[in-house]
Image: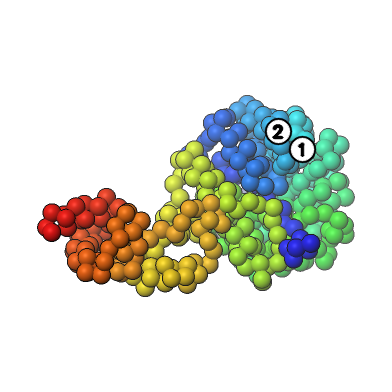
Amino acid sequence: MSESSHQDRVLIFDTTLRDGEQSPGATMTHDEKLEIAAMLDEMGVDIIEAGFPIASEGDFEAVRDIAKLSKNAVICGLARAQLPDIDRAWEAVQHAARPRIHTFIGTSPLHRDITALTQDEMVERIEATVAHARNLCDDVQWSPMDATRTERDYLCRVVETAIRAGATTINIPDTVGYTAPRESAKLIEMLLERVPGADEIIFATHCHNDLGMATANALAAVEAGARQIECTINGLGERAGNTALEEVVMALKVRNDIMPFRTGIDTTRIMGLSRKVATVSGFPVQFNKAIVGKNAFAHESGIHQDGVLKNAETFEIMRPADIGLNATNLVMGKHSGRAALRSKMKELGFDLGDNQLKDVFVRFKALADRKKEVYDDDLLALMRDSDLDA
Ligand code: KIV
Ligand code: ZN
């Protein structure tokens, strides 16, 4: 058995089609959702949250059809803590080989005010709705929305209630991206220590990125005992988004020495999914986005290009192929050096001798001073001009 098969398995729960689609303007068509679900399934995502069936007829149909088509992943539908929501979610996911109902209620003081429920009334609601879901489905996930701003004693009480009522996964959402890594870890440790029955269920972490800490908070929760990460492709999601799937998965892979957990993700499919989600959602990926940004494996400065050409590990902590990219991208610009130019020219079919390289390099630098980025076509034109001069 390999070293990694002894390591704790962390489940990857993708909510691109539910929380991701809740980004204003990121609506996807039925067919696009089906295509993305199929890609997520092939990539090895453990649970796909396919939508919020009571939200609209379109959402219902998407969840139902994804449930019918998916081969490996658990298919999950979201429901508020209301019986008609739960029934509708079940109606949609029951077609899956492995269905899950995910039900939630806001438990923080702010949310209790909105629902106008006392603490005791909310506990009764949780008991009734989770038990109802469990009567329909063996796999029930429950979330105390805004958990990180819920009083700790009350959080323990509601989590215990949901476990007793039959929840098999308890998700701890940082709904507004308010927590920080140490606090995220302490919260999971506290729940595991104080809540009876906590060792019999799976704790999930669901982080939003309002302070840019979603990935760090999710990984801290895993180190403290959470065994399911909720995330989206490209970190798509409400406001500043959710934990990015590609970031947590690659962090666990690259730093497995200090975070010895394994996922079932085929990381070589990351780039394909990133591009697909960016295209259908209409949300382009920022150039310097970790893992999937256009510049994540691009090098312009001479020192970096020279280093990478000699040994990629000098400036790359993962191989582009690991995420499904063909090769490191040497961006030709004013910071590039001779080694990069020689290598780029070779790629374009010109094996330059030292003297020729010297001449072309002078022309290239003059051009790079005028242009931000020198493209392959510019270099080809430069070579044509050199021929004319000769
Ligand atoms: O952020 C959140 O609290 C959610 C819940 C519905 C789980 O997305
Ligand atoms: Zn969320």
Q: Which amino acid does label 1 sit on?
A: Pro
Marks 2,1: beta carbons within 8 A: yes
In the image, what residue occupies the spot 30% across and 69% down? Answer: 337
Q: What residue type is labelled 2?
A: Ala
Q: Earlier in the sequence, mark 2 or mark 1?
A: 2
Q: Nearer the viewer, residue 387 or 299?
A: 387
Label drawn at residue 67: 2
In the image, what residue occupies the spot 70% across and 59% down? Answer: 262
**Residue 127 appears at what percent x and percent y?**
84, 45
Q: Can residue 151 be seen in this view?
A: no
Quarter of the picture holding the C terminus: bottom left
**Residue positioned most to the left:** 389
In the image, what residue occupies the spot 82% across and 54% down? Answer: 201
Secondary structure of the residue carrying tag 1 is strand
Quarter of the picture holding the N terminus: bottom right
Residue beneath disc 1: 99
